Image: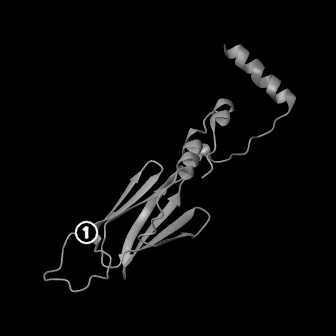
């Protein structure tokens, strides 16, 4: 596997630490774990949905935790069936699925129906970070503002 050295980027970039951490995490060898299967869907400009196949898991067997820039879905079957299994083909194995979230993405809601866990996500950019239009004024207006500010001081 080929590794990438991000050191030159660290020297000339400021404030991109999270991006570099994401790239380094993705670059590390991770086990090919596809349990449980899931879909991710962009449902709108700022809305997303994760759907996970969790057949056999009840609501109380699942935990959804949101941390800054991270969503963790954990499942662990708590009740064992009584009796002796002759064949066990249904996988109730515990899982821990992690999703990296962009800044300002939060969980809007979650539901489980027919063995599918649905998690709705929404990006909510604060007003202070949204683009705003700047009024352009003439030079004379700026001079008047500076003069008024000097008089006030």
Q: Residue at x 53, y 54 (%)?
A: 124
- Which residue of the protein is positioned furthest toward the right in this rendering? 139
- Where is residue 33, by image quadrant? bottom left
- Where is residue 123, by image quadrant? bottom right
Query: Relative to 151, is 142 above or below?
Result: below
The kind of secondary structure element at disc 1 is helix
Q: Is residue 54 visible?
A: yes
- Which residue of the protein is positioned furthest toward the bottom in this rendering? 86
Quarter of the image where the C terminus is located? top right
- Residue 76, given in percent of the width and then of the height, sits at 28, 66
Q: Residue at x 82, y 29 (%)?
A: 141
In screen coordinates, is 97 left or right of 137? left
The colour scheme is one colour
Q: Residue at x 73, y 20 (%)?
A: 148
In screen coordinates, is 40 left or right of 94? right
Residue that mark 1 sits on:
60
Query: Relative to 90, is 42 above or below?
Result: above
Nearer to the camera, 146 or 1: 1
Q: Residues within 10 Å of mark 1 (few under 14, many from 20)?
A: few
- Which residue of the protein is positioned furthest toward the left in this rendering? 83
Nearer to the camera, 63 or 97: 97
Query: Relative to 145, is 30 above or below?
Result: below
- Which residue of the protein is positioned furthest toward the front in this rendering? 1
Give the tally of numbered discs.
Answer: 1
- Residue 84, given in percent of the width and then of the height, sits at 15, 83
Query: Relative to 78, is 116 above or below?
Result: below
- Where is residue 95, by image quadrant? bottom left
Q: Residue at x 35, y 79 (%)?
A: 55
Q: Is residue 125 visible?
A: no
- Residue 32, given in percent of the width and then of the height, sits at 48, 64
- Residue 17, given in percent of the width and then of the height, sits at 57, 38
């Amino acid at each position: 596997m080929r590794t990438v050295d991000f050191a030159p980027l660290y020297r000339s970039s400021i404030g991109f630490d999270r991006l570099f951490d994401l790239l380094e995490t993705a670059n590390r060898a991770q086990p090919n774990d596809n349990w449980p299967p899931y879909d991710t869907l962009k449902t709108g400009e700022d809305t997303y949905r994760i759907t996970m196949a969790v057949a056999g898991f009840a609501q109380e067997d699942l935990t959804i935790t949101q941390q800054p820039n991270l969503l963790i879905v954990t499942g662990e079957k708590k009740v064992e069936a009584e009796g002796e299994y002759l064949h066990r083909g249904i996988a109730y194995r515990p899982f821990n699925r992690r999703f990296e979230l962009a800044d300002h993405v939060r969980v809007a809601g979650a539901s489980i129906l027919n063995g599918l866990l649905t998690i709705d996500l929404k990006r909510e950019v604060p007003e202070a970070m949204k683009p705003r239009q700047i009024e352009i004024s003439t030079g004379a207006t700026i001079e008047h503002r500076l003069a008024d500010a000097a008089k006030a001081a």
